[in-house]
């Protein structure tokens, strides 16, 4: 997860957002992801939007 942090987190960028999910499709904490709090909030919001648009699962299979 050492990718450079983008300025804008796009909810359609599923490959990037999946890095921040556990195998059970839960959002990882910022201590584990090593991103700043403001970036973590952007990631959380993008994951929520992607779930609402059915791009990401709410629960893993």
Image (cartoon, grey):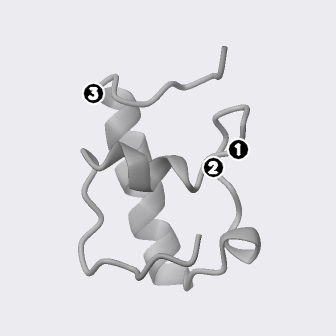
Question: Badge 3 is on which residue?
Answer: 53
Q: Residue at x 71, y 64 (%)?
A: 29
Category of crowding for the residue at label 1, using alpha-carbon neighbours closer than 10 angstroms: few (below 14), some (14–19), many (at least 20)? few
Q: Nearer the viewer, residue 6 or 44?
A: 6
Q: Are marks 3 and 1 in contact (CB under 8 Å)?
A: no
> For the N terminus, which image quadrant?
bottom right
In this image, 11 relative to 27: left or right? left
> How far is the residue under mark 3 from the one under mark 2?
17 Å
> In the rendered image of this protein, does residue 4 appear above or below residue 54?
below
Element type where label 3 sits in the image: loop
> In the rendered image of this protein, does residue 59 appear above or below residue 34?
above
Q: Nearer the viewer, mark 2 or mark 1?
A: 1
Category of crowding for the residue at label 2, using alpha-carbon neighbours closer than 10 angstroms: few (below 14), some (14–19), many (at least 20)? some
- Please tell me in which quadrant of the rendered image residue 59 appears: top right
Question: Badge 2 is on which residue?
Answer: 27
In this image, 57 relative to 23: left or right? left
Between discs 3 and 1, the one toward the N terminus = 1
Q: Are marks 3 and 2 in contact (CB under 8 Å)?
A: no
> In the rendered image of this protein, does residue 30 appear above or below residue 43?
below
Element type where label 1 sits in the image: loop
In this image, 32 relative to 34: left or right? right
Question: Badge 1 is on which residue?
Answer: 22
> For the C terminus, which image quadrant?
top right
Question: Which residue is the extreme one toward the front?
Answer: 2
Q: Residue at x 70, y 44 (%)?
A: 22
- Name the spot of residue 53 as percent of width and height, x first: 27, 27
> How far is the residue under mark 3 from the one under mark 1?
19 Å
Category of crowding for the residue at label 3, using alpha-carbon neighbours closer than 10 angstroms: few (below 14), some (14–19), many (at least 20)? few
Q: Are marks 2 and 1 in contact (CB under 8 Å)?
A: yes
> How far is the residue under mark 2 from the one under mark 1?
6 Å
Q: Nearer the viewer, mark 3 or mark 1?
A: 1
Label at residue 3: none
């Amino acid at each position: 997860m050492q990718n450079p942090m983008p300025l804008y987190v796009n909810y359609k960028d599923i490959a990037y957002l999946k890095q921040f999910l556990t195998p059970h499709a839960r959002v990882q904490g910022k201590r584990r992801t090593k991103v700043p709090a403001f970036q973590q909030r952007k990631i959380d919001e993008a994951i929520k939007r992607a779930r609402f648009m059915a791009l990401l699962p709410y629960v893993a299979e």
